[in-house]
Image (cartoon, rainbow, N blue to C red):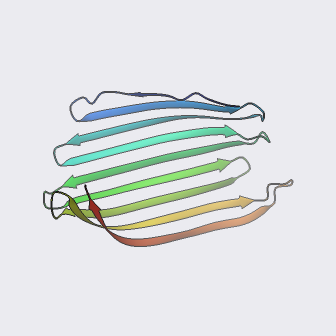
Amino acid sequence: MPIHGPVGFGWPSFCPYAAMLSSSRTKTGAIDSHETGYGLGLSYSSGAFSVGSALQQFRERDGAGIKHTRTEYGLAASYDFGPAKLFSHYMASKHSIPGGAFSKWEHANIGVSVPVSDSLTLMAEYGRNRVKARVYDDTPPNAYLGQIKGHTNYIQFGIRHTF
């Protein structure tokens, strides 16, 4: 039976600032595995400008006793010009395993949203995803299998309707 123990605390917004802290520990009783994590989020918003960031890290040990570390972070910002709102964000995640194996994923975008009525907004966005990984065979002697690298670019358009 899994045991979950998340704890979180969010400060009330003081003027344009806000913060959030979290911590968690998860353990599965039948298998010797567990995960602990923590997170921190900060934001600032004043008038037309907003910016926020977040960081979280998880450390886990799987049933075989192998320790993994996963770190995730992000940064986002927007500015409302009135007739259009510019927004952008960057997110990344890195998963590390002893012996040199890892994976890293990144995503970045920039976009604009234009309200055409009280309930309808048109949106356009350009973004890029990247991935990189070093892969090992998971059986002894853990032979190096190679690297994976790649990226995609995208452009998307959308409509947001509020009912």
**Residue at image coords 26%, 60%:** 161
The answer to whether 156 is drawn above or below residue 108 in the figure is below
- Residue 68: quarter of image: top right
Depth check, front residue: 52 or 27: 27
**Residue at image coords 80%, 42%:** 64
Residue 73 image point, x, y percent: 46, 47
Depth check, front residue: 59 or 27: 27
Q: Residue furthest left?
A: 82
Residue 123 image point, x, y percent: 27, 65
- Residue 70: quarter of image: top right
Residue 131 image point, x, y percent: 56, 63
**Quadrant in which the C terminus is drawn:** bottom left
Q: Residue furthest front?
A: 163
The reply, left or right, for residue 8 in relation to residue 82 is right
Residue 62 image point, x, y percent: 73, 41
**Residue at image coords 51%, 64%:** 130
The reply, left or right, for residue 142 in relation to residue 21 is right
The answer to whether 70 is drawn above or below residue 33 in the figure is below
**Quadrant in which the N terminus is drawn:** top right
